[in-house]
Amino acid sequence: MLIQDINWLPLIASLSSDRVLETMVNQYNNWRILEFKHRENISDCLEMSLHDFTCYLESRIRKEDIESMIDYGVSILDDCQLDLKTTLITLHEEFLEWKGGYFEVKPERLQDWLCIISLIDPAWVVGSAYFSLLEDNIIDLDQLISCLENQCQSALPKHTSNKTFADNHVHLGGHGNSSLSMLDFALYLSHKKPIEKSKWPYRPECTIFNSGKLDITRLPFKVNYLFHNYISTTFAIDECTLEDVVSWDKPFIESIDESLISYLERTNAHTFQQSLIVNSHLASISEPNRWLLLIISLLSSFELDSCKTNQFINIIIIASNLLRNHMIVSGVGLGDFVEFFGFKYRKPNNPTYKPHSLLNDLDICRFREFRISPDTLIELGKQNVAHLNPKPLIDLYSTLNGDERQLSNNVHFVVHFTRGLPAGKEKNDKLLQEVRREICNQVSLIQDFYASNYFSNINIANLSTSQNIDLRTLIRGYDVAGNENELPIEVFAPALRVLKGSYFPTKGMITKRLRRPFITAHAGEDFNHIITGMRSIDETIIFCSYSEDDRIGHGLALGIDVNEWSRKQSRAYVDKFQHLDNLVWLYTKGVELINSCSKFDFNLITLEHKIQKWTRYLYPELKPTISDLQSAWKLRRNSPEHVNSEIEFSSRELELWCPDKTYINKNKNSTDVIIWNKYINYEIQEKIEKKDELVNISLCEQSSVTDPIAGLDYFSESEKYLLTAVQDMLIEEYSRKKIIFEACPTSNIYIGRFCRYWEHPIFRWSPPDSTWIEEGGKFNRFGIRTGSLKVCVNTDDAGLMPTTIENEHKVLENTAIRSFGVSSYIAEQWIDKVRELGVEIFGGNHIRTVVTPN
C-alpha cells in the first residue's frame, strides 16, 4: 500500500470521498428549500472525510493537524462550496509538465504522483492540464486530438529513445487502463445489470458506501445518468429536472437514454463544448483517450457565476473518481487483489476490451509475455469432458497480427494454472484428488497440442491475407498463479516438471519438435509468516526441479528486511503443522549455512529445542527425528495419484510425475513415508483435531513461551538473525543456479506490505552499487554473497495498479537516486542493465512465429 503525503490528502479527499459526495448530493437536492448560508459547511464534511483517508497515512494524525491541512491546502469558496476546478489546476501545475506534444509527470515528482493516482483518476488532472492549454489558445481542437494519440492516460514517463523494453510478467485481463471502462460507463453502459453490494471490492475510505447510507450498486448507473443529462443539457435536447438526476434514491436505472449515442452520430456540433462531446464518441483515437475529451468538455462547463452548475459538475467528478477507484487495487494481500481482479465492472461488456487488454501500450519497441489461463487452449464440453479448442489462442494471434504494426512477434504466452481452493474443500485437504486429476488431464491435452501436426501448420483465415502458422510457438512457458495461501506448490509441481520435460510421444507426422518451455511460479508474494514465504520459494525451486533461467514470480520473502517485516506484521497465525514445517525448514537451512559459517551453532540449538516440543505434541507416537520430518516434506513433490498408478507412462515421464515412487513403495513403514501418508490422506483418515488449531506467534514482543498445547510461540531474535543469513545464502545459491526473479515493484507495493519503493527487495537482489555486496557491505553483512541475483522488471497487472513498463524502470532509477544516494549516472547504468536483461530473457524464450502464405 502506497503511503500518501499528508500535504495532498485534502485534495485527494475532495475529489474522491463518498462523504463529500453525499453532502453535495444533499445540498443540491435542498437547493430551493434552504438558504445557501444555512447549508452544511463543506469544510466540516471534508474534515470528517480526511479521517476516512488516514488509513493511507503511516500513522493517525491529530484533529488539529486535519484542520490545518484544510486551511492550508484546499480552496473553499465562501467557506461552503468546494472548488474542484481549482483543485485540479493545483494538481496539474504541481505535478505535470508540457512536453510539446503531451503531458508527463515531472521527474522529481514521480513517486508522489504514483501515490496520488492510486486514489484519484489521473485523467481528471491530465484533462485539466489540456483545458488550460485550450483556454490560453496554445492548442486547438485538432491539435488536442493529435496530442491525445500520444498521451499516456496516467501521464507516466516515456522513453523518447528507441530503447526496447520487455514486460515478462503480465496477466491478460489485468492489463490495460481504467479509462476504457470509464468512457463505457459514461457513454455506453454496456453493463446494464447492477452487481450486488457483496460483490463490490472493499475500500476502507468509503465509509458512506460501506455503511449502506448510499447504495453503491447505483454508482455506475448514476455516473451514466449524470453524464447523459450533462450531454443532453449541452445540446439542449432534454428538459430534465436536475434534482431528479442528482438524487440518489429516485429510480433511474430503467430511464437510461440509449438514443443519445445515435443522436451524437447524426448531429452537428455548434460549440466547442459540443465538439468535444461528439469527438469523445467519434474521434479516431483510442477509447481510453476519448475519455479525456469528455472530461475536458465537462471542465469547460464550470461557470464563475453559477454555484449550482458547478455543484452539479463537482458531483460528476467525485462520482466518477469513486467508480474508477473500485477498479484499482486497495488493501494488502492476494485476497484483496482477487476481489478487485474479479470485479465485473472493471471490464466493460463491449468488443473493444479484449483487444485493449492485449494491445494497450504495446508497440514495436515493447515485448510482452502474457499469462493466460488453460481455457485458452482447453474447453470443457458436454458431460464435463475436456478437449482441445485453441480458438481463443487463434483469436489472440489474429488481434496481434490484424494490427497494421504486425505485433505477433512481440508477444508470447505463458499458460498459468490457477491456485484456488475448490468450493467445499478445506485447506487441510492436501490430497485434492479432483484438482490433481483435472491438472493431469490438462497436461495430457497440452501434450497433445504440442504433438499435433495440425497445430504446427494451422490456417488463420480471418486476416487480410490467409496464413499458415505454427500455433505451438505462441505458448512458451507454464506458471502457477493465484493466492498461494490456498494451494501449495506441491499440487502443481508434478505437472510443471512433466511439461518442462517435453517427453511426450510423437503422434503422427509432426514436422518438428520445439525447444522445451520454461517454468515460473508465483511464490513468496503474500504470506502469513516470512518463513512460510521463504519456504514457499524454496519448495517451488526444489519440488519443480528448477534449472537455469526458470523463474520465480515476485519472491518478496527472500529479500525483505526480516526485522522490519516483523515490526509491521506484529503477529502471525499459522497452522500448527505448517509452523513445524517452518521450524524444520529453517533448521535444515541453518545446517547448510554453518558449513560455511559456524557462528550460527547457537541459533540451531535453540531452534532444535523448539522443534522437539512441537514434534512431541504433533507426533507423540511416531517420535520422528528432524531428518524424518525433512524427508517427509520432500516427499510432497510426488503426485499421490501416480504412486500406485497402473496408467502407462514412459519411464521418463513417470519419474517426473513421481520421482520417489520406488522409495515410497519400498519403505512403507518408515517414519518419513508414514508422516507423508498422514499428511496426504487427511480427508480419508479420522479427523485430527490438531489440524484445525492455529499457532499465535508474537513477532516483535520478545517472550520465551513456546506452548504447543496453548498454541503459543514467538519469533525470537535468534531466529530473525539466522533467517537474515539464510536469505543471503539462498540469494547466492539461486544466483549460481541462474534462476531469475520477476520483480513487479508497483504491484508488490499495492499487494504486499511495502509502503515505499525503496523497501522493495530488488535493491538487495541486484544492487545499483556493487560495493553493497562486497564482504561486510550493506547487503552482505555475513560475507556469504559473491554476486547479484538475476532480475527482470515487469508490470504484473497494469490495469489494476496504474503503471507502464517504462515507469517501472524509471521509478526504480528514481528511487536509487533519491532514497539510496546513488549518482544519476550509476543509477541509469544499473537500470539499463536490468532492462537489457529483461529483453534478453524474452528473446531467449521466444520462438519467432513463421508465417506461410496459404
Image (cartoon, helix red, strand yellow):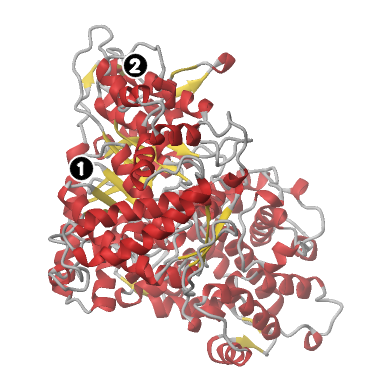
For residue 549, the mark is 1
Label 1, secondary structure: give it: loop
Q: As displayed, is residue 330 above or below residue 14?
A: above
Which mark, residue 448?
2
Q: CA distance from mark 2 to mark 1?
A: 25 Å
Q: With 41 as the anchor, is 290 left or right in this view? A: left
Quadrant of the rendered image containing residue 374: top left
Of discs 2 and 1, which sits in the foreground?
Answer: 1
The crowd level at tag 1 (other Cα within 10 Å; few <14, some 14-19, many 20+) is some
Instruction: Characterize the local packing of mark 2: few (<14), some (14-19) or many (20 or more) Cα atoms within 10 angstroms.
Output: some
Q: Nearer the viewer, residue 74 or 636?
A: 636
Residue 228, x across and y down, in percent = 66, 55
Compared to residue 533, the image places residue 451 above or below, namely above
Q: Is residue 771 visible?
A: yes
Q: Say which amino acid is labelled 2.
A: Asp
Residue 101, visible in the rendered structure: no
209 relative to 173 in the view: left or right: right
Relative to 174, is 457 on the left or the right? left
Closer-to-camera residue (347/639): 639
Q: Nearer the viewer, residue 730 or 199?
A: 730
Q: Residue farthest to the top?
A: 508
Q: Position of residue 114 (x, y in %)?
A: 41, 68
